[in-house]
Image (cartoon, helix red, strand yellow):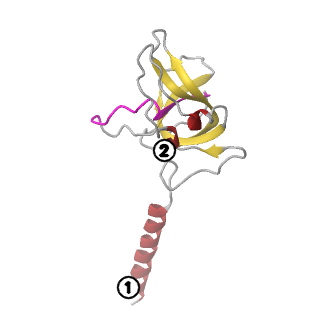
């Protein structure tokens, strides 16, 4: 009888441990968010991407609504998927794209110009190893077109990161 009770207790403990582990949010999951820093506002892609920017081709002008332009210069925290970009050895910062969508499948669509943010972060920032895991990036948002030499819009959002979590 003692062995049966011990086995039942062990099974119950294993079940409770499994439920706790399964329900504990991991960094990057939808249920977890690190504490918000003072003076910072949470900002989601639902606000950044709730408009049609228009064409990004040379000599065209897209439209960034005033409700989005007013975010320029604000300290914000945005959650998204990290896509590292090439950074030269010795650069004091790293550059990556923070995207609304994950690269789970090669059949997905390219993110719209307002569905990603170009991020400049300190070289020692810890990025997720897996792009399917989300990161919270805190910093000062820059809203406005960045164009290449031919006038093609490269980005409309940039963020000078102070923290990547």
Q: Is any atom of residue 162 visible in this view?
A: no
Q: Residues within 10 Å of mark 1 (few under 14, many from 20)?
A: few
The residue positioned 42% from the left and 27% from the top of the image is 54
Mark 2 or 1 closer to N-term? Answer: 1
Furthest residue in direction right, as rendered? 38
Asked if the residue at tag 1 contacts the one at tag 2, i.e. Cβ–Cβ closer than 8 Å, the answer is: no
**Left or right position of 68 against 15:** right
- Tell me the CA gap for discs 2 and 1: 54 Å
Q: Nearer the viewer, residue 152 or 84?
A: 152
Q: Is residue 109 magenta?
A: yes
15 vs 125, left or right, is: left
Tell me which residue sits at (64%, 51%) in the image: 35
Q: For residue 46, which numbered disc appears in the image?
A: 2
Q: Is residue 53 magenta?
A: no
Q: Where residue 104 sits: x, y (%)?
A: 34, 40
Image: 91 above or below 162: above
Q: Which residues are magenta?
A: 106-122
- Residue under circle 1? 4
């Amino acid at each position: 009888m003692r062995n049966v009770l011990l086995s039942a207790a062990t099974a119950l403990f294993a079940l409770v441990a499994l439920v706790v582990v399964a329900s504990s949010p991991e960094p990057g999951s939808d249920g977890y968010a690190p504490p918000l820093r003072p003076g910072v506002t949470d900002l989601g892609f639902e606000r950044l991407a709730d408009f049609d920017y228009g064409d990004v081709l040379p000599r065209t002008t897209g439209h960034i609504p005033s409700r989005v332009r007013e975010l320029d210069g604000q300290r914000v925290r945005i959650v998204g998927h990290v896509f590292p970009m090439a950074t030269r050895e010795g650069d004091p910062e790293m550059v990556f794209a923070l995207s609304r969508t994950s690269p789970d499948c090669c059949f997905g669509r390219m993110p719209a110009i307002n569905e990603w943010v170009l991020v400049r972060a300190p070289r020692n920032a810890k990025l997720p190893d897996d792009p399917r895991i989300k990161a919270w990036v805190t910093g000062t948002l820059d809203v406005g077109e960045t164009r290449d030499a031919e006038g093609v819009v490269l980005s409309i959002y940039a963020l000078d990161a102070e923290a990547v979590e």
